[in-house]
Each structure stands twice: as C-alpha cells, then as structure tokens.
C-alpha cells in the first residue's frame, strides 16, 4: 500500500516515538564499551603517573644512597607498571561495567591490585638487573591506591553527569518486587557505569499495584513504581522498556519463554537471572549486578575498535570517491535535468539506526509527479521511471549521492538498506532488529538472489550481517558489490 506524497511531521514523530525504535545520541551498549576502554586508559595513565611520582619522591628523601635513574627509564617502568595494573584489573573483571551500593569492589581492587603489580614489577626489575630502590615499591603501594580511588570517583561523577539527560541509559523494567528485585533495583540505581535506569517493577501480586519500591541506601532513597501483572507486550511498550530483567530465581522454562515472547513483541531485550549452578549461553552478554548474574538476550556486540575503524573507512572512502566522481556527478545531473522536468536530486526521508529519520539522497530516476512515498519499482518498465532513470537504476548510478550520507554519518558504505517510514511502521520485533546498526549503501541482501523482493521479507541477510559483521566482512561485501556492478548484477 502506497503512502501519500506528503507525510507530515506528526507521522515522523510517531515513527520515532515507537517503542521498538528508540533514537538516542549513542547507544547504551556502545557507551558502556567506550567507558570500559576509557577506564582502562585512565588506570594506565594514573598508575604510570603514580609510580613516576614515587620515583621522584624517593629521590628527594635523604634516605639511602642516591641512585640516578633517567627520566626515560622512569617513563618505561611507569608504562610497564600501568600495563600490569590494567591486566590484573581486566582479569578481575573490573572493566565489565558492574558496580554496587558502596563501590566496595572498586576500592578493594584499588588497594590490592597496585600491590600485586608492584610485586610483578619487582620480579621483572630483578630479572633485568634494574637498580630500583625498595622505597619506590613501598611508596607506590602506599600512594597509588589513593590516586586510583580519586580517579574512580571522578569517573563516577563524569558518568553521572553524562547520563543526566537520559542519553547512554537503557530503561529497565524489573520483574519481581521481592528481596532479589529490590536488591537489583538498588544496585542499578547506584551503579551508573552499567548504564541502566530502572523505571518500573512488575509483580503479579495485585495488592502491590500502585505501591513503590524504595532503593536501599543511606541517602536519597529513590522510589520505583510497582505495576500489576501479567506481563504483556502492551505493558512493556507503555513503559518504553529497553531491557526487561527477570529478578525471580528458579523460573520455569515455560515462564521464561512466555516473558521472552512478550519482550520480543515489545521490542525489548530480556535478561534472566542465572542460578548459581547455571551456565550462561554462548554468544550472549552477561550482566553482573552485585554478585547476581543475568543472561541477556543481547548478542556480543562488536568492539569500539570496529565502530571507530568503520567510521574512519567510511569518511576516507566517501571523501575520495566524492572528489574523484565529481565530474560524473555533474554529467548525470545534466542528463537528469535534460531528460525530464524536476530537480537533479531526489531527497526522501528514510529510517536509520534506532529509528532516527534522515534525508537520503539519490539521483532522480522517476518523474517529478511520482508518489514520493510508495513501494519502489521492481521492473524497469515501471511507468514512473524516466528514460535516463532506467539506465541509472540498472547501473546503480542513482545511488551515488548516498556517498554524501556516508560522509555525514547517517549511512555507511556497508549495512542494511534503509527503508521508508511507512514500511518500518509495520515491522514486527524481528524485522526491527535491522535498525540496530547504521544503514548502508550496499549489503548482503543486495548481493543475494532475493534482492528482487522487498527487503523486510528477507531480513535473515541483514540479521546475519549484524551478528557477524567485521571490517573484513565489510571489505568483502564492497569487493563483491564492485564485481556485481561491473557484471550488471545489481
């Protein structure tokens, strides 16, 4: 069914506000990944600075024989010591993103890890024959915990500040108002590094409907409202739930399946409390909250390095191609204008990552009076297509202006194709998963034999790409796209 030529702003607002499609500055998952790496870098720099300060402090003390150590050696030792600390923190899951009411684990690590790293450094110095005073190691063990604790508090405050406007935070609904649920709520509220904001509790006890669960803590006891069950997709959608956490131990497999189906229909992720003897599934993320482990339905995300490398490649290649293809752009624009009345470019609203709407650019291949929002032509004989438009579509030259979208960041060279809002409005939960990544100019679907049918009828290609995407896969898709284009396959 075709949409009208003009789709009003209210329609766009409704599309963006859909519970399954949540726009945000940066995804909570990417924010947590970037935060963990930033914490590791901060730890490394803090430790390097701490041991360097210990060197200079001990050199200024009138104790023992003075030993001259070059600043270069101090910097090298500081770097090695910082790497030791980061490695020990990583082994202790310090960068997993957990936390607790009193941040006891962070303080405990700040006291223990520097001592362990100092022992490792002392062993290395003996093996390498480095003349490092024992006072340096002692000063490091005393000085560094204070620096690490101060640094963690600064990071904690920065994260709180970044999350005040609601960005980088996933809205969490907890199932179960008992002791376990209350403990989970308190831990989430006091652990901003997790990036979760509890907004409601669902419980099947109707007597609790309208009540509030107060978080445990010494000050500022925020209250979370309790909603009466049963759990339905409509209830989760009304709460704009990003993550549904089942905080009741020993739920039956049937109950978990029922809740999982409701969450999927609402477009929410689900996390199930794992029993002490349970094993988390492979290829799923694990959420740790104050000693409790939740198996999330989220699959392992690609690293921050992949996201950064992909963006660098997109900017570099789109910039080069826009410059090299500028004469071709001008030629095509002239041919489009001479062939039929109307503008050279066709600008259309498309749905991007997390449901954000953006302007997608194409060379106009249809007559100006053709419906702007309607199913795309599937045949070159479609009467809406102009003469030059048939050639442009057959050679895929009409897609070239999307290099501008790639440069602007609204699209990528490789990714699921963006669709029109009226099509996305009818997505089910499975099809909505296409919106987890930035859309692209080309992808697996375009290379498949099913590219003649609508995209959303063949989402398995896009879902496979989302699960397995790497820089190598992106390059492979670009190579195959070039081959297909040369052969006239696309």
Image (spheres, rainbow, N blue to C red):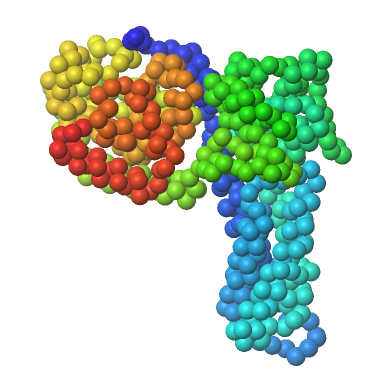
Q: Which residue is drawn at 46% across and 25% down?
A: 430
19 versus 66 height, above or below: above
In percent of width and height, residue 460 lies at 38, 30
Q: Residue at x 75, y 39 (%)?
A: 187
**Label total for image:** 0
Q: Which residue is drawn at 73% across and 24% down?
A: 201
Residue 241 in sight from this viewpoint: no
In percent of width and height, residue 438 lies at 42, 35
The answer to which of 462 and 345 lies nearer the viewer is 462
Position of residue 234 in the picture relative to residue 331 (left or right): right
444 versus 323 height, above or below: above
141 versus 36 height, above or below: below
Quadrant of the drawing holding the N terminus: top left
132 versus 51 height, above or below: below
Residue 452 in sight from this viewpoint: yes
Image quadrant where residue 101 sits: top right
In percent of width and height, residue 393 lies at 19, 27
In percent of width and height, residue 271 lies at 63, 34
- Seen from this angle, which residue lies furthest right? 218
Image quadrant where residue 194 sits: top right
Q: Which residue is drawn at 16% across and 39% down?
A: 486
Quadrant of the drawing holding the C terminus: top left
Position of residue 356 in the picture relative to residue 41 (left or right): left
């Amino acid at each position: 069914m075709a949409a009208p030529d003009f789709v009003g702003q209210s329609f766009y607002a409704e599309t963006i506000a859909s519970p399954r499609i949540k726009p945000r500055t940066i995804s909570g998952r990417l924010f947590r990944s970037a935060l963990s790496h930033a914490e590791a870098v901060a730890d490394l720099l803090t430790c390097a600075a701490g041991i360097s300060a210990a060197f200079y402090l001990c050199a200024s003390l009138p104790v023992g024989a003075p030993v001259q150590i070059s600043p270069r050696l101090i910097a090298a030792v500081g770097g090695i010591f910082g790497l030791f600390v980061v490695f020990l923190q990583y082994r202790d899951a310090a960068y997993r993103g957990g936390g607790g009411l009193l941040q006891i684990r962070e303080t405990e690590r700040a006291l223990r890890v520097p001592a362990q790293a100092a022992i490792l450094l002392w062993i290395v110095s003996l093996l390498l024959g480095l003349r490092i005073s024992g006072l340096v190691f002692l000063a490091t063990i005393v000085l560094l915990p204070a620096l690490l604790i101060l640094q963690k508090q600064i990071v904690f405050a920065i994260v709180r500040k970044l999350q005040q406007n609601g960005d980088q935070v996933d809205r969490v609904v907890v199932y179960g108002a008992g002791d376990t649920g209350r403990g989970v709520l308190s831990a989430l509220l006091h652990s901003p590094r997790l990036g979760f904001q509890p907004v409601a509790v669902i419980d099947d006890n109707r007597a609790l409907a309208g009540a509030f669960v107060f978080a445990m803590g010494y000050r500022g006891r925020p209250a979370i409202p309790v909603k009466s069950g049963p759990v339905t997709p409509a209830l989760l959608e009304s709460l704009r739930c990003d993550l549904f956490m089942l905080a009741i131990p020993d739920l039956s497999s049937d109950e978990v399946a029922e809740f999982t189906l409701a969450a999927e229909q609402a477009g929410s992720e689900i996390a199930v409390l794992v029993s002490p003897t349970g094993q988390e599934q492979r290829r799923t993320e694990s959420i740790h909250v104050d000693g409790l482990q939740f198996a999330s339905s989220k699959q392992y995300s690609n690293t921050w390095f992949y996201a950064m490398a992909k963006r660098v490649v997109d900017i570099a290649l789109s910039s080069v191609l826009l410059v090299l293809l500028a004469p071709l752009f001008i030629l095509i624009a002239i041919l489009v204008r001479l062939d039929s009345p109307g503008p050279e470019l066709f600008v259309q609203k498309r749905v991007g990552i997390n449901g954000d709407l953006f302007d997608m650019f194409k060379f106009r291949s249809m007559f100006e009076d053709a419906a702007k929002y309607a199913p795309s032509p599937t045949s070159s004989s479609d009467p809406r297509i102009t003469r030059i438009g048939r050639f442009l579509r057959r050679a895929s030259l009409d897609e070239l202006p999307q290099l501008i979208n790639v440069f602007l960041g609204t699209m990528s060279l490789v990714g699921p194709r963006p669709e029109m809002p009226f099509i996305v409005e009818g997505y089910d939960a499975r099809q909505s998963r296409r919106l987890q990544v930035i859309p692209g100019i080309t992808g697996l679907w375009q290379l498949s034999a099913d590219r003649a049918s609508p995209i959303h009828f063949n989402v398995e290609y896009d879902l496979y790409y989302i699960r397995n995407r790497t820089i190598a896969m992106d390059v492979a898709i670009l190579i195959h796209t070039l081959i297909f284009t040369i052969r006239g396959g696309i």
